[in-house]
Image: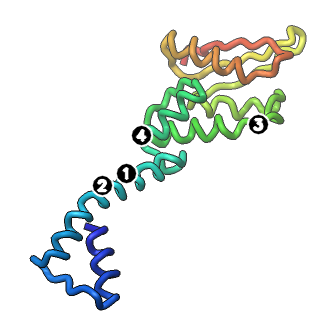
Amino acid sequence: MRAFDSMKDKLSKTGLYQIEEGSMIYNELAAYAVGLDIIYSAVEELIRECFVQTAVDYGLTIRESILRKCNTDLTVDGRRNAITAAMSIGNIDNTVSALGKYPKIFNINGEFTEKISENKIVFTCDDVLTDEQKEHIEFQMGEYMPCWLDFEFTLSGG
């Protein structure tokens, strides 16, 4: 009981209380401590989930739903990396040279090819994806693409 030890230590230092096991003040502090420890645990969890680097549960899920993205790596580290990559995309990252950041958002591997004559950018994914994953990632990656380029998403068959 962290709360109990903290309260006992602070109250004992005042010299006003003799906190001995079995005394009324001891029992009262023990009762308060049960509730406080529950609150402390909840606050610690909330603080942990507020930051991408320490979140392990709903903190990641909430950010993924806000970013509306599909991630092929469902490990905690993979989810964190994808969220961090998505949050690192800024308004200066809409050039062809900056497109290399985009696959990290989805934890996929591949390469961008520019087809200047067709005013098109093609991403060839090296990973094996289900049709649903391909469709979802293609749509979401397209949302990041510069508006002046047509975007095509292909699978290399890997």
For the point 48% across and 31% down, the residue is 73
Callout 2: 10 Å neighbours few (<14), some, many (20+)?
Answer: few
Left or right: where 102 falls relative to 91:
left
Query: Which picture quadrant has residue 127?
Result: top right
Q: In what element is the residue under mark 4?
A: loop
Q: Which amino acid type corresponds to the residue marked 2 in the rendered image?
A: Ile
Q: Which amino acid type corresponds to the residue marked 1 in the rendered image?
A: Ala
**Residue that lies at the very extreme toward the left in this rendered image:** 22
Q: Disc 1 to disc 3, how far (Cα)?
A: 34 Å
Q: Disc 2 to disc 3, how far (Cα)?
A: 40 Å
Residue occupied by mark 2: 38
Q: Which amino acid type corresponds to the residue marked 3 in the rendered image?
A: Gly
Q: Disc 2 to disc 1, how far (Cα)?
A: 6 Å
Query: Which picture quadrant has residue 104?
Result: top right
Q: Disc 2 to disc 4, how far (Cα)?
A: 19 Å
Query: Which mark identifies residue 57?
Result: 4
Left or right: where 45 falls relative to 21:
right
